[in-house]
Image (cartoon, grey):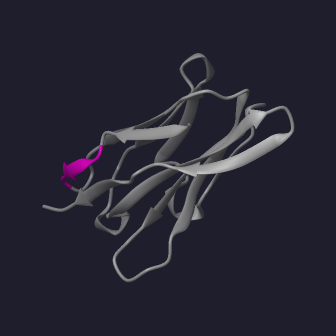
Amino acid sequence: QVQLVESGGGLVQPGGSLRLSCAASGTFFSVGAMAWYRQAPGKQRELVATIRPGGYINYLEAVKGRFTISRENAKNTVYLQMNSLKPEDTAVYYCYTGIELQPGRISGYWGQGTQVTVSS
């Protein structure tokens, strides 16, 4: 069974920084693309950043230059470094990972979500 465990959310003032982590554990063949989504109250969940095994990265336009996604393959972990945070970044942040359970058999998994609140 695969589990994604997130950590690192919290309350921060505008202009501050937070670092989110998401670690995959369990029995599987490999980890594919890893991503962060967020969902603000009353809004749809949106894709914030993606990182693929080969290093390809893309970001939501609104976070470019402020957020950095990275991964540590040996630990099956993805990070999201968030700098210059704004009140509009307030949301529940979810990690999403494609897990190759067996060669050629890939399933998507979600983390439990972590609250990020940007407020003075």
Residue 17 x %, y %: 30, 43
Q: Position of residue 96 (x, y in %)?
A: 57, 50
As drawn, 44 above or below 58? below
Looking at this rendering, what residue extends furthest in the front direction? 1
Q: Position of residue 89 (x, y in %)?
A: 37, 62
Q: For residue 34, what is the image quadrant?
A: top right
Residue drawn at 27 percent across, 51 percent down:
15
In the rendered image, the quadrant that contains the N terminus is top right
Q: Is residue 80 visible?
A: no
In the image, residue 120 sits, relative to residue 107, either above or below, namely: below
Q: Per the image, is 34 magenta?
A: no
- Judge whether 60 appears above or below 21 on screen: below
Q: Which residues are magenta?
A: 9-13
Residue at image location 12% in from the left, 61% down from the top: 120
Farthest residue in the top direction? 74
Viewer-closest of 94 and 67: 94
Counting from the top left corner in percent of width and height, residue 30 is at 72, 28
- Left or right for 10, reference 19: left
Q: Front-most of 117 and 97?
A: 97
Most frequent secondary structure within the magenta stretch: strand
Residue placed at 31% from the left, 39% from the top? 8
